[in-house]
Image (cartoon, helix red, strand yellow):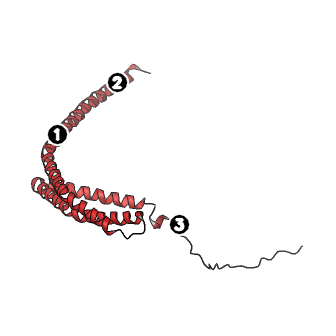
Amino acid sequence: MDMNNTTPMMQTFNQIKTEGGTRSQRIGKILKDAFNQTSAELKEGYTIVRPLAAEMSATAAADLKEKRHQASSNFKEAWGNETDSSSTWERLQRVFQMMATALKKTLTPPLRKQATRVDTKFTDQYGDSYTSMKRGLQSLKNWYVKATDAADPADSSTQPQAVPHGSVTVDVVASTVESPVQ
């Protein structure tokens, strides 16, 4: 092998090595800039979202404290109304069902009100960015629901179908087979 054949190959190798180093430095700078921008955006978002979240939490806590007394009296009333139940277990089940219904009626409106306030604030403050993000999260939620529904073992379409008890008719087509006589 001639030495002159390796010289162009070494030059090409050195050129590739130099170009690769330059590219990796550019990529590193791009990634560093992207990280710095992301970090700054997260910090800014945190300073904006944190007071809103604290306000929402405080309002929700105040609403819950207000409703606590009402729930307590509802529980006492429900327990008193269920004295005619045949067993303590049935009595507890009915009381818990009544309490769940009462809690749902009591807590749902204030929580919806808070969610609407936050949604309005974010829409006003962030506009299309927030709306776009909200749509993305909704599509992610829809995808997740579809994925979990498809994997749900209680889904009857994936379960073997049971044959009902009773008479089952099976049609069999038969024909005689002639065999040679020996």
Q: Earlier in the sequence, mark 1 or mark 2?
A: 2
Which residue lies most toward the top here? 3
Give the CA separation, mark 1 to mark 2. 40 Å
Indicate the quadrant where residue 96 lies.
Answer: bottom left
Looking at the image, which is closer to me, 99 or 86? 86
- Which quadrant of the figure has residue 178? bottom right
Q: Which residue is painted at 29% across and 31% down in the image?
A: 20
Q: Secondary structure at mark 1?
A: helix
Residue 19 percent across, percent down from the top left = 27, 30
Marks 3/2: CA distance? Answer: 67 Å
Residue position for label 1: 37
**Residue 72 drawn at (x, y percent):** 25, 59
Badge 1 crowding class, 10 Å Cα cut-off, few under 14, some 14 to 19, many 20 or more, is: few
Mark 3 and mark 2 residues within 8 Å of each other at the beta carbon: no
For mark 3, what is the residue?
Answer: 160
Q: Secondary structure at mark 2?
A: helix
Q: Amino acid at mark 2?
A: Met
Return the residue nearer the eye: 137 or 113: 113
| Label 3 packing within 10 angstroms: few (<14), some (14-19), many (20+) | few
Q: Quadrant of residue 84?
A: bottom left
Q: Which numbered disc, 3 or 2, marks the residue that appears first in the sequence?
A: 2
Image coordinates of residue 155 in percent, x first then y, are 44, 65
Give amino acid for label 3. Pro
Tag 2 residue: 10
Marks 1 and 3, Cα distance to the nearest angstrom? 54 Å
* 156 is higher (above) or lower (below) than 39: below
Please identify, in this view, whether the residue under mark 1 or under mark 3 is nearer the observer: 3
